[in-house]
Image (tube, helix red, strand yellow):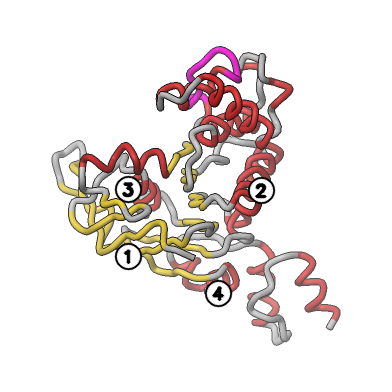
Amino acid sequence: METIVRIEDVYFEYLNLEEQEIAALNGVDLDVKSGEFIVIIGHNGSGKSTLAKHINVLLRASRGSVWIKGLDASIEENLWDIRQTAGMVFQNPDNQLVATIVEEDVAFGPENLGIPPDEIRRRVDEALEVVGLSKYADTAPHFLSGGQKQRLAIAGILAMKPEIIVLDEPTAMLDPSGRKEVLDTVKALNKSDNITIIHITHFMEEAIDADRIIVMEEGDIVLNGTPQDVFAEVELLKDIGLDVPQIAELGHELRGEGLDIPMNVLTVEEMVDALCQ
């Protein structure tokens, strides 16, 4: 697989309210392959959202290099193409919805790209079908549930045909049902359409199905590996203030009591199999 995101030795500093310089990223290196499903975790202030905003150039590195599909993010002329390549979905869906009718909201992005009307119609219908909102095309967004609104925000990004979707804690304001709706949609986009997903979350269970997990702490990447590898580091994750999935913690406790539970057990079904053996 080709590398679609390359971040090399990236630093980012900003000024706080007291005009003090704060380092949000400290020489971060990260490659993301086309079609990967990456989850970034870390507590508030760890730098995960700051890193994500470099991928569609909402922020630009103080030092270092960011390349998106071979385009250098430091070159002004590349910004338009990069932002078409990498779409972003934020935490609060109400802040992303701009129209009074669902299908008009999905059409907003393609219209601003200058897409012909017939193609916009096709893209809107296709995007609403993908996120399961076709029957709400003529509905006002404020009648939708939280999970449906977030799926509508995803449809608006899909209609612009990005190759990367960055999701910045898109389930933080949703109930468990809404979280499942959004996650199922995101996983389907990754598997069926091969869209590269970079998903930021503080829900550890949302990371279990990722291809790779990035753990951030104080502007640095402290772990980078498969879910099995990362969640085997229970003590390290706890030391930096993060939880682990309940099954991973149970496995850790059982190993401490002398049971032979494999390190890569992350689901209920895997735990049942391990205990039965």
Q: Is residue 50 above or below residue 90?
A: below
Mark 3 surroundings within 10 Å by alpha-carbon count, few (fewer than 14), some (14 through 19), many (20 or more): some
Residue under pointer 1: 29
Residue under pointer 4: 229
- Residue toward you, 54 or 155: 155
- Numbered range of the magenta stretch: 94-103
Is label 1 in contact with label 4 (beta carbons under 8 Å)? no
The kind of secondary structure element at disc 4 is helix
Mark sitting earlier along the chain (4/3): 3
Rounded to the nearest angstrom, the CA distance separating label 3 from label 2 is 25 Å
Residue positioned most to the right: 276
Report whether residue 106 is seen.
Answer: no
Rounded to the nearest angstrom, the CA distance separating label 2 from label 4 is 24 Å
**To which quarter of the image does residue 101 belong?**
top right
Rounded to the nearest angstrom, the CA distance separating label 1 from label 4 is 19 Å
Residue under pointer 3: 54
Q: Residue at x 71, y 39 (%)?
A: 177
Rounded to the nearest angstrom, the CA distance separating label 1 from label 3 is 12 Å
Q: Residue at x 47, y 56 (%)?
A: 40
The kind of secondary structure element at disc 1 is strand
Callout count: 4
Mark sitting earlier along the chain (1/4): 1
Mark sitting earlier along the chain (1/3): 1
Which numbered disc covers residue 56?
A: none
Which numbered disc covers residue 188?
A: 2
